[in-house]
Image (cartoon, helix red, strand yellow):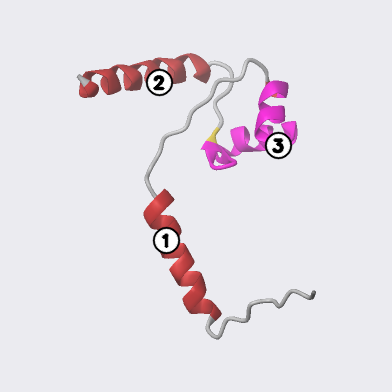
């Protein structure tokens, strides 16, 4: 038995309907942060190469949608994350 593929009369309308549904369900803002002990571990977990991480650091850009902080900046970043966590705990009381 042969499967028939669906034919859509208006693919743009279909795409916009799917997009609006996805935005309604998953379009909430989030903050994501992670700490990796080594660059090799970060590469493995993020699925990137060391060159991509180094380029993002040099350009002050992002990789996989997230900023990369390395070296001396890690201490200040961890301090900020601790403050964010404290604020979150105060707001949940």
Name the element at disc 3: loop
Nearer to us in this view, 45 or 70: 45
Which of the pair 1/60 is nearer the observer?
A: 1
Label at residue 21: 1
The magenta stretch spans residue 53: yes
Q: In the rendered image of this protein, does residue 30 appear above or below residue 10?
A: above
Return the disc, 3 or 1, that comes first in the chain's sequence.
1
The alpha-carbon separation of the residues under discs 3 and 1 comes to 30 Å
Rendered residue at 53%/37% (across/down): 66
Q: Mark 3 and 1 residues: CB-CB less than 8 Å, in contact?
A: no
Q: In the rendered structure, are the residues bearing label 3 and label 2 in contact, judged by CB atoms less than 8 Å apart?
A: no
Q: Can you tell which quarter of the image residue 42 is in?
A: top right
Q: CA distance from mark 2 to mark 1?
A: 32 Å
85 up-or-down from 16: above or below = above
Label 2: state its secondary structure.
helix
Residue position marked by numbered label 2 in the rendering: 81
How many neighbours does mark 1 have within 10 angstroms: few (below 14), some (14-19), or many (20 or more)?
A: few
Give x and y (percent) for residue 19. Answer: 46, 63
Question: What is the distance, in whole Å, between disc 3 and disc 2 at their CAs?
Answer: 24 Å
Span of residues in magenta: 40-66
The magenta stretch spans residue 67: no
The label on residue 92 is none
Q: Secondary structure at mark 1?
A: helix
Residue 79 placed where, x, y %? 40, 15
The answer to whether residue 27 is left or right of residue 11 is left
Q: Quadrant of the N terminus?
A: bottom right
Residue 54 appears at what percent x and percent y? 67, 32
Q: Is residue 25 left or right of residue 63?
A: left
Give the residue number, with chain letter if any, for mark 3: 48
């Amino acid at each position: 038995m042969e499967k028939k593929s669906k034919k859509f009369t208006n693919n743009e309308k279909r795409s916009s309907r799917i997009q609006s549904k996805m935005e309604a369900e998953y379009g909430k803002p989030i903050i994501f942060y992670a700490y990796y002990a080594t660059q090799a571990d970060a590469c493995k977990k993020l699925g990137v190469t060391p060159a991509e991480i180094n380029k993002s650091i040099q350009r002050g850009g992002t990789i996989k949608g997230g900023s990369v902080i390395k070296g001396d900046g890690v201490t200040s970043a961890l301090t900020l994350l601790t403050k964010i966590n404290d604020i979150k705990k105060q707001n949940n009381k």
